[in-house]
Amino acid sequence: MEARVKELLSQMTLEEKVALTVGSGFWTTHAVPRLGVPAIVMTDGPTGVRRARPNARNPLGEDLPATCFPTLSTLAATWDVELVREVGAAIGAECQALDVQLLLAPGVNMKRSPLCGRNFEYFSEDPVLAGELAAAYVQGVQSQGVGATVKHYAVNNQEHERFTVSAEVDERPLREIYLAVFERVVKKARPWAVMAAYNQVNGVPACEHHELLTQILRKEWGFDGLVVSDWGAVTRRDRSLAAGLDLQMPGPDDDFDAELVRMVREGRLPEAVVDEAAGRVLSLVLRAAANRRSGATLDEERHHQLARRAAAEAIVLLKNEGALLPIRADQIRTLAVVGRFAWEPRFQGGGSSHVNATRVDCAYDELRKLLPERVALRYAPGYPAEDALDEALLAEAVEAARSADMAVLFVGLPDAYESEGYDRTHIDLPPAHNQLIHAVCRAQPRTAVVLANGAPVAMPWLDLPAAILEAGLGGQAGGGAVADVLLGRVNPSGRLAETYPVCLEQTPAYLNWPGENGRVRYGEGLFIGYRYYEKKKEKPLFPFGYGLSYTTFAYTGIALSTEEITDQDDLVVTVTLRNTGNRAGKEVVQLYVRDIESTRVRPVKELKAFAKVALEPGQEKQVRFTLTGRDLATWCPERHDWCVESGAFEILVGPSSAETPLRAVVTVTSTAAPPVFDESTLFKEFLRHPVAAAELRRLTGPQMQAISPMTWVFIQDMPLRRAVGDLFRGRSRSELDAITADLVRQVNAAVQAAAGKSQA
C-alpha cells in the first residue's frame, strides 16, 4: 500500500494532490480517474447508516432505509463489549450494502454535564467504560472492511457556541479524562480515521492543533490513519494541513484549492505537507476500494432482532418495590398502557445521527403480541404530542389506570428536548409528563414507569411508582425490548453509564457551564461524574454503574496474584460471583482502584475494568481482571508522562460505584526515576517520600523533636532552606546554608541508593 501511494503521488499534479485534501461534495472525496483513483463515500452514524439517496437534493434529509440501533448512550448501559462489537459489525455490514466506505462514528466525548444536547451520541462519563465500548464498536465496523471514525477530537462537550468556544482545561484532566478515551480506542482498535472537532482547545482550534493532531495523536499514540475535519470546522486550510489535518469536509473548495497551490509554488507552504495529507487520503481510499463488496445486501430481519436484543440488554431497572416486575400475566386481567410514547415511540436522537429506520416497533403492539388474549389492554395517550397539559387526556389516563390491575406509564423527553446543535437548559421532563406520573401513580399504586431519554432527568416523583425502567433511546426495536423486560422474557441487566443527579445544581460543571466570552472553564478538573459526587460526599439520585435485576447476586471472594508489585508488573485480580436468586441473569462486575495515600489530588476511586457475567440460578463463576501500571498512574505535568507513586493501592469490586463489597490491597513500588530534592523543595515533600523522610529524621532528629506543635504546623509549607532556619535556631547564615546543602546531598544520595536497590 505504501509503495502504491508513493507511486500515485509521484504521478499527480500539485492541483490533484491539493484537491485530495478536500471533499468533492458533501459526502465524497475527489477521484483521480486518469490514475484509477476512485472516490469514496462517507456518512454519519453511530446509531446506524445515514446514507443519503443518490442524487438527493438535500444531503441531510433524504436517506436510504437502514437499521436504527440503540443510541450510544443506551448501548453503553449494556456494559457488554461483545454485544457492542456485534452491533458495530452489523452497522459495518449495512455500510457495505449501502456503498459506504467510511462511517463517521463513534462519538466518544465525555459527558461533562447532562445538559449537552448531543449526549445521546456519547457513551459515558468515564473514559475506561467509553474507551472499551468504543474500541469494540470500531473493531466491529472495521471487521466488515469499512472504516470507522472516532470523534470529536477533542474536548467537545457542549453544543453552545460549538463552532468557536474554547474549552479551557488543565493538563491532568485533559490527559486523564478527555484524551484518555481517544488514546484507548486508537491503540486498541486502530480506527481508520479520527475527526477533529469544531471547538478550540485552550485557545487553539482543534483543526489547527499541532500538539493534539501530530505530537500526541500520531507521534505519541502511533495513529497512522486519516484525520478528517468535522463538517465546516476548517477556517484556514494551510494551518490545518500544517498541524496534521488531512481532509477538509465538506467540499468542494475551489477558491482555496487555488490559494493553496499558490502558497506551495511561492514557498509559503511546503509541498511535503500537502503530500503527507494527500497520501493519507489515498491510503484510506485504496484500503476502502480493496475491501468493497459488490452485491452486499441488507439483512433487515436479523439486524432488527439484534437491535431488539441490544435494547433489552441496555434497559436499567432503577426501582422495583414489591417485585412488581416482571408482570405476571396469570395474575392480571387488565393492563393500562399509558403515555403517547407507548404508541408513538421516541427511539433516537435528533441531528446528524438520525436514521431512516427500516421499521419501528411500538411497545403497545409488542405487549399485545406477547400477552395472552384474556389480558385486556387499555391504552390512553395521557399527553398531547406538543409540550402542553391536556386535562381531558389526563383524566382519561387516570381512569384507565384506576380501573386496571396495574399500569405501565411511558414518558420521557420529546425530540425537541435534546438534539445536536443546542444544549438543554434543564434536566426536567415536560410538565405534562410529570403531572401524568403524579396523577396515575396516585390512582394506581401498581404502576411501572418506562423512561425514554438520551440523558439523565430529574425525578421529583421517584417515591410514587412501584417500578421504574430506564429504557433510554432504544432504536427501532426498542418497543419490543421494553415488552421483553416488562414480561420477564429478558432479565434486566443494564447498568447506568452515567450518574443521575437529584437536580441540575448538584452537577459537577454547574458553576462553569456553558462559559462566557467565548471560553468555558473546566473548573471541576478531574472531578466529573461519579468522581465528583464521591469526592464531595454528595449522594446522587442514582450512582454510576447502578442497576437492579429480577434475581440476586453475591460477591463472595477476591484474590490477588501477588500482594507486592512494581509499576512494570501486571496484577491479576480474581473475583468470585454467585447467582443467589431463582432466575438466570447477568451481573456487571465493576473493578475500581483507590490510591490509599497520594501526594497528588486524586478521585476517591476510578473504574479500571469491568465484565458482564451470565449466571444460572445457583451458579458461581470466577472473573479475572488484569491490571497494569497504567491503571495505577496519574499524568505528571512536570514529567510530561504517566507516573505511579510507590505505596498501597486498594482494589475495590462490586455492582456499582457506590457499592464495592470486595476489597484487597496491593503494595506498589515505582521504578520511575526518583525525585531530586533541592533547597527550594517544600519540607512536606521530603516527609511524603518514605526514604527522604527517614533520612531527614536521621539527620535532624533532635532538632525535629525540639520543635513546638505550632511551629511544626508552619514548617510543613516552608522550603527546606527556610525550615532549616527554624530547626537550627541561632546559627549564622553561612552555617545554615552549609547545613541545607549537606541535607540535600545526603537525602538525594539515600533516595538514589534506595531506587537502585528496588530496581535491582
Image: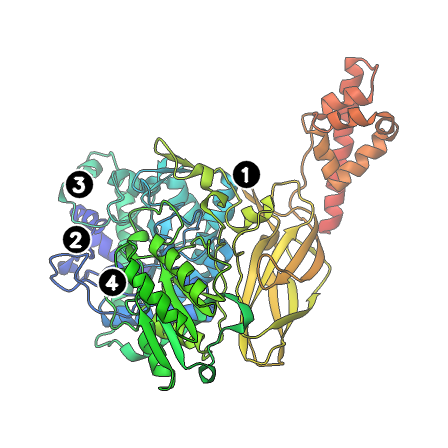
What residue is disc 1 on?
Answer: 637
Residue density around tag 1, few if under 14, some if 14–19, many if 20 or more, within 10 Å: few
Residue 725 sits in which quadrant? top right
Of 311 and 121, nearer the camera is: 311
Amino acid type of the residue tagged 1 in the rendering: Pro
What residue is disc 2 on?
Answer: 24
Residue 339 sits in which quadrant? bottom left
Of label 4 and label 3, which has the lower sequence position? 4
Residue 256's mark? 3
Q: In this view, does 535 lie to the left or right of 733?
A: left
Whole-Å distance between the Cαs marked 3 and 1?
39 Å
Of label 2 and label 4, which has the lower sequence position? 2
Provide the secondary structure element on which disc 3 rests. Answer: helix
Whole-Å distance between the Cαs marked 2 and 3?
13 Å
What residue is disc 4 on?
Answer: 50
Q: Position of residue 138 (x, y in %)?
A: 39, 63
Between tags 2 and 4, which lies in front?
A: 4
Residue density around tag 2, few if under 14, some if 14–19, many if 20 or more, within 10 Å: many
Give the number of marks: 4
Provide the secondary structure element on which disc 1 rests. Answer: loop
Instruction: Judge whether 608 appears above or below 694 on screen.
Output: below
Of label 1 and label 4, which has the lower sequence position? 4
Of 34 and 661, nearer the camera is: 661
Q: Where is residue 234 in the image (x, y as percent from the top left)?
A: 26, 42
Q: Tell me if residue 291 can be seen.
A: no
